[in-house]
Image: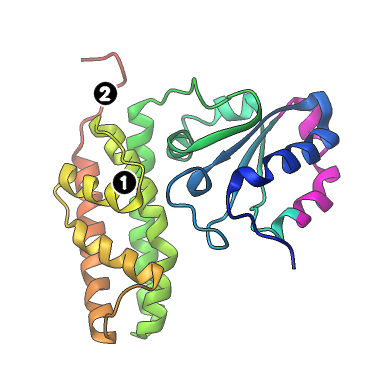
Amino acid sequence: MAKIPKKPDAIFGEIAGDYQRIFGSNLLSIILYGSGASEDYLPGKSDLNFLITLTEPGIERLDLTLETVARWRKRNVAIPLFMTRAYLTGSLDAYPIEFLNMQRHYTVVAGEDVLAGLTFDPRHVRLQLERELRGKLLHLRSGYLASEGSARKIRELIGASLTAFVSLFGAMLYLKGAEIPPVRHNVIEAAGQAFGIDATVFLQCDQIRTKTDRFSSAQVRAVFRDYLKEVGRLCEKIEEMDIQAKGQP
Protein backbone atom coordinates (compact mmCIF):
# COMPACT_ATOMS: atom_id res chain seq x y z
CA MET A 1 0.00 0.00 0.00
CA ALA A 2 1.32 3.45 -0.93
CA LYS A 3 2.40 5.54 2.03
CA ILE A 4 0.25 8.62 2.77
CA PRO A 5 2.29 11.52 4.20
CA LYS A 6 1.51 12.69 7.74
CA LYS A 7 2.85 16.13 6.84
CA PRO A 8 2.68 17.51 3.29
CA ASP A 9 6.23 18.86 3.34
CA ALA A 10 7.49 15.28 3.68
CA ILE A 11 6.86 14.74 -0.04
CA PHE A 12 7.93 18.15 -1.36
CA GLY A 13 11.42 17.09 -2.44
CA GLU A 14 10.17 13.91 -4.13
CA ILE A 15 7.28 15.45 -6.01
CA ALA A 16 9.37 18.44 -7.10
CA GLY A 17 12.06 16.08 -8.37
CA ASP A 18 9.53 14.06 -10.37
CA TYR A 19 8.16 17.08 -12.24
CA GLN A 20 11.54 18.74 -12.67
CA ARG A 21 12.77 15.58 -14.41
CA ILE A 22 9.76 15.66 -16.74
CA PHE A 23 9.67 19.37 -17.57
CA GLY A 24 13.15 20.73 -16.84
CA SER A 25 13.37 24.45 -17.61
CA ASN A 26 9.71 24.43 -18.72
CA LEU A 27 8.66 24.05 -15.07
CA LEU A 28 8.03 27.50 -13.58
CA SER A 29 6.38 26.70 -10.26
CA ILE A 30 4.94 24.02 -7.99
CA ILE A 31 2.60 25.26 -5.26
CA LEU A 32 0.66 23.32 -2.63
CA TYR A 33 -2.68 25.01 -1.95
CA GLY A 34 -5.87 24.39 0.00
CA SER A 35 -6.32 22.34 3.17
CA GLY A 36 -2.91 20.70 2.74
CA ALA A 37 -1.34 24.11 3.33
CA SER A 38 -3.67 25.03 6.20
CA GLU A 39 -4.49 24.05 9.75
CA ASP A 40 -7.41 21.94 8.46
CA TYR A 41 -5.13 19.27 6.96
CA LEU A 42 -6.04 15.73 8.04
CA PRO A 43 -3.62 12.97 6.91
CA GLY A 44 -5.38 10.36 4.82
CA LYS A 45 -8.57 12.43 4.54
CA SER A 46 -7.51 15.76 3.06
CA ASP A 47 -6.40 15.80 -0.56
CA LEU A 48 -3.04 17.33 -1.40
CA ASN A 49 -3.67 19.85 -4.16
CA PHE A 50 -0.86 21.23 -6.32
CA LEU A 51 -0.79 24.04 -8.86
CA ILE A 52 1.93 23.42 -11.45
CA THR A 53 2.77 26.34 -13.74
CA LEU A 54 4.52 25.59 -17.01
CA THR A 55 5.81 27.41 -20.07
CA GLU A 56 3.82 27.18 -23.30
CA PRO A 57 6.07 24.37 -24.65
CA GLY A 58 5.78 22.60 -21.29
CA ILE A 59 1.98 22.49 -21.29
CA GLU A 60 2.14 20.55 -24.56
CA ARG A 61 3.99 17.69 -22.81
CA LEU A 62 1.30 16.58 -20.33
CA ASP A 63 1.30 13.10 -21.85
CA LEU A 64 4.66 12.56 -20.14
CA THR A 65 3.02 12.94 -16.71
CA LEU A 66 0.49 10.10 -16.95
CA GLU A 67 2.48 7.56 -14.93
CA THR A 68 3.64 10.14 -12.38
CA VAL A 69 0.14 11.52 -11.77
CA ALA A 70 -1.26 7.99 -11.35
CA ARG A 71 1.47 7.06 -8.87
CA TRP A 72 0.92 10.15 -6.72
CA ARG A 73 -2.85 9.66 -6.69
CA LYS A 74 -2.27 6.44 -4.75
CA ARG A 75 -0.71 8.62 -2.04
CA ASN A 76 -3.71 10.94 -1.72
CA VAL A 77 -2.29 13.59 -4.06
CA ALA A 78 -5.02 15.00 -6.28
CA ILE A 79 -4.47 15.44 -10.01
CA PRO A 80 -2.52 18.71 -10.18
CA LEU A 81 -3.81 21.81 -11.90
CA PHE A 82 -1.45 22.36 -14.83
CA MET A 83 -1.53 25.80 -16.42
CA THR A 84 0.60 28.46 -18.04
CA ARG A 85 1.17 31.89 -16.56
CA ALA A 86 -0.93 33.41 -19.35
CA TYR A 87 -3.83 31.07 -18.56
CA LEU A 88 -3.59 31.91 -14.87
CA THR A 89 -3.64 35.69 -15.28
CA GLY A 90 -6.26 35.48 -18.02
CA SER A 91 -8.62 33.53 -15.75
CA LEU A 92 -8.84 35.97 -12.85
CA ASP A 93 -12.02 37.60 -14.19
CA ALA A 94 -13.76 34.26 -14.81
CA TYR A 95 -12.61 32.29 -11.74
CA PRO A 96 -11.58 34.86 -9.12
CA ILE A 97 -12.92 32.81 -6.19
CA GLU A 98 -10.79 29.77 -7.01
CA PHE A 99 -7.60 31.84 -7.19
CA LEU A 100 -8.59 33.94 -4.17
CA ASN A 101 -8.93 30.75 -2.15
CA MET A 102 -5.61 29.44 -3.44
CA GLN A 103 -4.04 32.66 -2.22
CA ARG A 104 -5.46 32.14 1.28
CA HIS A 105 -3.54 28.92 1.97
CA TYR A 106 -0.52 27.97 -0.08
CA THR A 107 3.13 26.97 0.13
CA VAL A 108 5.67 27.33 -2.66
CA VAL A 109 7.26 23.92 -3.18
CA ALA A 110 9.56 24.85 -6.07
CA GLY A 111 10.14 27.75 -8.43
CA GLU A 112 8.33 31.07 -8.51
CA ASP A 113 5.54 32.36 -6.29
CA VAL A 114 3.01 32.91 -9.07
CA LEU A 115 0.13 33.63 -6.65
CA ALA A 116 1.67 36.44 -4.60
CA GLY A 117 0.93 39.33 -6.94
CA LEU A 118 -2.58 38.39 -8.03
CA THR A 119 -5.32 40.99 -7.50
CA PHE A 120 -9.06 40.60 -7.99
CA ASP A 121 -11.78 42.94 -9.21
CA PRO A 122 -14.54 42.85 -6.54
CA ARG A 123 -17.18 43.04 -9.30
CA HIS A 124 -15.91 39.78 -10.78
CA VAL A 125 -15.90 38.16 -7.32
CA ARG A 126 -19.48 39.26 -6.66
CA LEU A 127 -20.69 38.03 -10.07
CA GLN A 128 -19.16 34.59 -9.57
CA LEU A 129 -20.55 34.44 -6.04
CA GLU A 130 -24.08 35.05 -7.25
CA ARG A 131 -23.70 32.49 -10.03
CA GLU A 132 -22.23 29.85 -7.70
CA LEU A 133 -24.77 30.38 -4.92
CA ARG A 134 -27.77 30.22 -7.22
CA GLY A 135 -26.41 27.12 -8.93
CA LYS A 136 -25.80 25.40 -5.61
CA LEU A 137 -29.28 26.27 -4.37
CA LEU A 138 -30.77 24.55 -7.43
CA HIS A 139 -28.46 21.57 -6.92
CA LEU A 140 -29.50 21.20 -3.26
CA ARG A 141 -33.20 21.34 -4.13
CA SER A 142 -32.78 18.74 -6.87
CA GLY A 143 -30.64 16.55 -4.62
CA TYR A 144 -33.24 16.69 -1.87
CA LEU A 145 -35.97 15.51 -4.23
CA ALA A 146 -33.71 12.74 -5.52
CA SER A 147 -33.06 11.62 -1.93
CA GLU A 148 -36.76 10.76 -1.48
CA GLY A 149 -36.36 11.92 2.12
CA SER A 150 -33.66 9.37 3.01
CA ALA A 151 -31.62 10.76 5.91
CA ARG A 152 -28.57 8.85 4.67
CA LYS A 153 -28.77 10.44 1.23
CA ILE A 154 -29.41 13.87 2.75
CA ARG A 155 -26.28 13.43 4.87
CA GLU A 156 -24.32 12.61 1.72
CA LEU A 157 -25.74 15.67 -0.04
CA ILE A 158 -24.76 17.94 2.85
CA GLY A 159 -21.28 16.42 3.07
CA ALA A 160 -20.64 16.83 -0.65
CA SER A 161 -21.78 20.47 -0.75
CA LEU A 162 -20.57 22.06 2.50
CA THR A 163 -16.88 22.48 1.59
CA ALA A 164 -17.77 24.61 -1.42
CA PHE A 165 -19.78 26.96 0.78
CA VAL A 166 -16.80 27.53 3.06
CA SER A 167 -14.82 28.65 0.00
CA LEU A 168 -17.63 31.00 -0.97
CA PHE A 169 -17.73 32.41 2.56
CA GLY A 170 -14.08 33.37 2.17
CA ALA A 171 -14.92 35.31 -1.00
CA MET A 172 -17.86 36.99 0.74
CA LEU A 173 -15.59 38.18 3.55
CA TYR A 174 -13.15 39.48 0.93
CA LEU A 175 -15.93 41.64 -0.53
CA LYS A 176 -16.63 43.02 2.94
CA GLY A 177 -12.96 43.81 3.43
CA ALA A 178 -13.05 41.54 6.48
CA GLU A 179 -10.28 39.26 7.71
CA ILE A 180 -10.62 35.67 6.49
CA PRO A 181 -9.81 33.31 9.40
CA PRO A 182 -7.49 30.35 8.73
CA VAL A 183 -9.77 27.64 10.19
CA ARG A 184 -13.00 26.36 8.61
CA HIS A 185 -15.41 26.83 11.52
CA ASN A 186 -14.07 30.34 12.16
CA VAL A 187 -14.70 31.24 8.51
CA ILE A 188 -18.32 30.10 8.91
CA GLU A 189 -18.75 32.12 12.10
CA ALA A 190 -17.16 35.24 10.57
CA ALA A 191 -19.42 35.05 7.50
CA GLY A 192 -22.45 34.69 9.74
CA GLN A 193 -21.54 37.84 11.64
CA ALA A 194 -20.65 39.84 8.51
CA PHE A 195 -23.76 38.93 6.53
CA GLY A 196 -26.36 38.31 9.23
CA ILE A 197 -26.95 34.65 8.40
CA ASP A 198 -27.38 31.77 10.85
CA ALA A 199 -23.87 30.32 11.11
CA THR A 200 -25.16 27.59 13.44
CA VAL A 201 -26.88 25.88 10.51
CA PHE A 202 -23.63 25.64 8.54
CA LEU A 203 -21.72 24.48 11.62
CA GLN A 204 -24.30 21.71 12.06
CA CYS A 205 -23.81 20.79 8.41
CA ASP A 206 -20.06 20.63 9.00
CA GLN A 207 -20.68 18.20 11.88
CA ILE A 208 -22.70 16.06 9.49
CA ARG A 209 -19.91 16.29 6.90
CA THR A 210 -17.29 15.14 9.41
CA LYS A 211 -19.65 12.55 10.95
CA THR A 212 -19.26 14.04 14.44
CA ASP A 213 -22.96 14.74 15.01
CA ARG A 214 -25.61 12.72 16.82
CA PHE A 215 -28.61 13.95 14.86
CA SER A 216 -31.61 11.70 14.38
CA SER A 217 -33.07 11.22 10.91
CA ALA A 218 -35.75 13.82 11.68
CA GLN A 219 -33.10 16.27 12.87
CA VAL A 220 -31.03 15.75 9.73
CA ARG A 221 -34.05 16.64 7.61
CA ALA A 222 -34.68 19.73 9.77
CA VAL A 223 -31.04 20.84 9.41
CA PHE A 224 -31.30 20.45 5.66
CA ARG A 225 -34.45 22.57 5.50
CA ASP A 226 -32.65 25.31 7.45
CA TYR A 227 -29.62 24.85 5.14
CA LEU A 228 -31.77 25.54 2.08
CA LYS A 229 -33.31 28.58 3.76
CA GLU A 230 -29.95 30.12 4.64
CA VAL A 231 -28.50 29.49 1.17
CA GLY A 232 -31.54 31.28 -0.29
CA ARG A 233 -30.88 34.21 2.05
CA LEU A 234 -27.26 34.29 0.92
CA CYS A 235 -28.38 34.61 -2.70
CA GLU A 236 -30.51 37.61 -1.77
CA LYS A 237 -27.74 39.30 0.23
CA ILE A 238 -25.16 38.94 -2.54
CA GLU A 239 -27.64 40.26 -5.12
CA GLU A 240 -28.23 43.35 -2.96
CA MET A 241 -24.53 44.21 -2.67
CA ASP A 242 -23.38 47.28 -4.56
CA ILE A 243 -19.80 46.55 -5.59
CA GLN A 244 -17.41 49.02 -7.18
CA ALA A 245 -14.10 48.34 -8.85
CA LYS A 246 -11.08 48.90 -6.65
CA GLY A 247 -10.06 52.53 -6.63
CA GLN A 248 -13.54 53.81 -7.50
CA PRO A 249 -15.69 55.71 -4.96
Q: Is residue 130 visible?
A: no
Residue 82 at x, y = what percent?
68, 39
User: Label 2 sits on what residue type?
Assistant: Gln
Q: Residue at image x 24%, y 43%? A: 238
Residue 230 seen in the figure = yes
- Disc 2 target residue: 244
Residue 246 % position (x, y):
31, 18
Q: Earlier in the sequence, mark 1 or mark 2?
A: 1
Q: Which residues are magenta?
A: 54-71
Q: Amino acid at mark 1?
A: Phe
Q: Quadrant of residue 123?
A: top left
Element type at marker 2? loop
User: Residue 39 vs residue 91: left or right?
Assistant: left
In the rendered image, which residue does mark 1 sit on? 169
Tell me: residue 147, above or below residue 93.
below
Residue 40 drawn at (x, y percent): 43, 52
Is 63 part of what is drawn in magenta? yes
**Of the pair 66 and 16, the residue shown nearer to us:** 16
Residue 7 vertical placement versus 179 (above, below): below
Q: Who is closer to the viewer here, 45 or 226?
A: 45
